[in-house]
Amino acid sequence: MSVNGSGERTAGSAGALGPGAPGTGRLMAGTDKGDGGAAPTGVAGATDDSVALSIHGFCKVFPGTQALNDVSLQIRYGEVHALCGGNGCGKSTLIKILSGVVPADKGRVTLGGRELDASELTAKTSYELGFRVVHQDPPLYLDLSVAENMMLGGSYPTSRPNRIAWGNVRRRAHELIERFDIKAKPDTLVRDLPVSVRTQVAIATALQDVKDGRCIVALDEPTAALPAAEVQLLLSVVRQLASMGHAIILVSHRLDEVLAVTDRVTVMRDGRVFKDHRTQTLTENELIESIVGRPADEIRQRRATTSVGEPVLTVADLSAGPVQDVSFQVHAGEVLGVAGLLGSGRTELLSAIYGGLKKSAGQITLHGRPTNFTSMDKAIEAGVVMIPEDRSRGAAFLDMSVDENMDISVLSRYWRGFGFRRAQLRQDAAALRAKFKVKAPSGSVRMRTLSGGNQQKAILARWLRRDASVLLLDEPSQGVDVGARADIYSAVRSVTAAGGAAVVVTSDMEELAQFVDRAIVLRNGRLIAHVGSEELTAHRLNQLVHMESREKL
Amino acid sequence: MSDTALQTHPAGDRQPRFGALLERTGLPIFLVILIAIFAVIPSTGEDFRTLVNIQNILAYQSVTGLIALAMVLPLIAGYFDLSVAAIAGLSNVTVATLMSEYGQSVAVSLAAGVAVGALAGALNAFLVSVLNLDAFITTLGTYIFWAGALALYTGGTTIASNIPLEFSLWTTKKWLGIPGPFWLLIVVALIVWYFLTQVPFGRKLAAIGSNETAANLAGIRTRRSIGLTFVLSGVLAGVAGALLTSTNGGGDATSAISYLFPALAAVFLGRTAIDPGHYNVWGTIIGLFLVAVAVDGFTLMGAPASVTQMFNGAALVISVVLATFTTRARERKARGIQLQTLRSSDQPSSRKSPDTTPAQGSAAPAG
């Protein structure tokens, strides 16, 4: 199918042999057809034909973080190249810069044979030079047909000045469907397609006007939203694209997929390229080590020395939303980590405890008493507080002042029947800002002006000033720098040291290994492992979280 | 004045403090300048300065002002209530009908008017906070619906017979030389201001308006609070309608509903002053009188009465322009501050990063 589609467009330019041929290893099996007809030379391929994209010294600073720090990278035609790394390592920033959505601060790039300064990379030039991105959640129009989606991604063929040539539309869509081997008809509504096929449609849409079969296609977590049965299908599509001669950048958290489908892996960490691997010679352990940043057997960090006390929070057979049959206990003085990928039910678990999500079964016991919070204010009243993920959406009042953000949890304490005790409020707020190390010029500046770490500390102060006994933290260090992260955890420790308990959800396994006492691992809503302190390493957690194959614990 | 904490800046940043002060007081200053101009220039000065003119300006804004305050309540929580003018109409016709056709006492009629307002507000509350419908469309719908119901009930006539003269004359009564309706407006404004800024519930409303998801996760009963604002808004609209009955000496289907756009103009102008970026009571009152003074001045110059509409329209556009540009400037400034703190914290940290970041430290054995 790759022959009839791109073959006719590239007739005459098929002189050079498949550009990806030297370094492709397992690619061979799939390329026997593609190499002859569908893998032409690039026009400017004088120096190194096989390099589709090379990046030199990319830098990018965002408020709060150095997202990219001197990143250099080469991607070759005909290969699948994985970008791996923990959250916030800079993968998505890199993709955004390459697609021209976000400007880089510094760096040079060679794209499709043209060398540019990174600042010249606009969305238009990036597209023209053959860079295409297909996002995890591709922007398709669900209520329109496959053909219409494809044409809207490019342009409608018109006959007379403004009339759409519908016959032409159908023919072109048909052509694309054949070329990319999509199991759909041009008239099918995208809504009626399985998710993996939708992604295929998005890929076809992105690649429809490619004349010579040489594109750099970035797939951003294409399998994250897919049901397990469809993953395999999509991965074979990825291989097929590579065999057509395209260069594929695959961003993925699922290491088994990365190992199965790619030719090279680049691991990023803290905005830098940490290491380049050849997949052929890469083992799973090496890859995890590379991502996590420490040898698998490294001794884990010292934990707080407080002895574990009475159980504070007991969850028994809890089912709510995607969460199924989860049981665990947290004791006084303890910080329990929850490891799991996005969609594993980790956020819903906290929400169910907090009363934000109705539970369908199970029992939650707090300080020995059964509880059933029907609303969040009851949970707060009982001393259970939650710091939700996605601070700007779920926790911060960005256009209110820092002090007002901290007051909101304790307003009634400062109300005397006529008005607020404002002097006291101000004084206490200042003390809190000092205690939680919130760096702000004053308490009256708007929350928006603070960095992510300081916003998070202010939100932590909002809840910890209530003397809560159970802390539920969802991704507490998202978008927070290293120093603030330590401050946040020391504040959490101060609560547990006073007899409280904390449950921390984070996708950063390194962070879990470093800061929590014990962890549970969720996958697909089920608790699949308890990890005690003696085997609590980022490596172990990553194994448990990522590896579908290893069910044995 | 609504938040004394805002005045306490640390010493040192003089320049931004001045800018913030100007942003806060720009609209009141403009109002004062406008008054001064009309009082001085020859074409209006003589008439403008008269006591009667000033009393007129003060007295005639009260209905608009009350309706505007009724809109402020749900808006603080982030929800539109466009139906308030029609609810005022309901109250207006209720009060007039009870007095003229059923011979009820003034007190009973007024209470009934306010109660009808509360009921109509409760309907909005049900639709918006219980059924979770879009507030803008829903209250636009109830606005049109009630306007139609009023036209149907009154048949286009004014209900004015048997209205006690004493009641109609109340609006002309003065205390300390200032008309009664103005006092009513100021008292209601004080109550609303107190409720919104000095009571925990008001602060929670502001939190809902700022970020409803976060407010919900912070344990605030958001749906219930929002519903309550619609009921209270209906009560205020009921008061406005009752006052209108006295001002007009009767009830009719069309006069109340025409207050929607003047009130909107005052509310949006108000958002650009006193507590910029947030809907607030005193800003609304200033916005109200800004439009009133401008209209009065230009009518004295000889402009026809229809300029009022143009002023309301212009006020809406200008308030949006001001709000948008100041918000953008503020966000730009916030980004600037963040970048600045980032750079200042980046310098030392990047120098010592090799031995502090775990990635670097453990990279060697790993690779």
Image (tube, coloured by chain):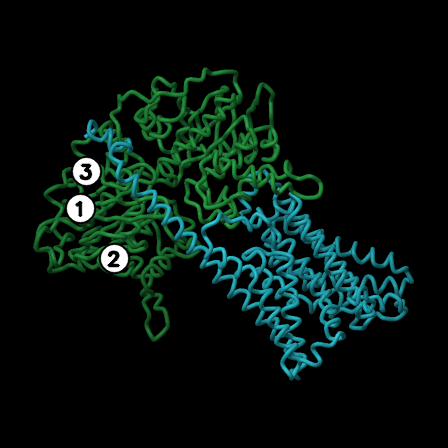
Chain colours: A green, B cyan
Residue at left offset 72%, top offset 59%: B186
- Please name the amino acid that badge 2 sits on: Ser
Q: Residue at horizontal 62%, vertical 45%?
A: B223
Above or below, A476 against A249 in this view is: above
Extreme residue in the right direction: B103
Label 1 chain ID: A
- Residue type indicated by callout 3: Asp
Sequence-first disc among 1 and 3: 1
Q: Mark 2 points at which residue?
A: A119
What residue sits right under mark 1 in the picture? A74
Q: Please, which chain is the residue tagged with disc 3 on?
A: A
Q: Earlier in the sequence, mark 2 or mark 1?
A: 1
* Residue at x-position 91% and y-position 62%: B103
Asked if the residue at tag 3 contacts the one at tag 1, i.e. Cβ–Cβ closer than 8 Å, the answer is no
Which amino acid type is shown beneath numbered disc 1? Answer: Gln
Q: Where is residue B140 in the image (x, y as percent from the top left)?
A: 64, 61
State the image coordinates of residue A52 (x, y, percent, origin top left): 17, 51
Q: Looking at the image, which is closer to me, A32 or B47?
A: B47
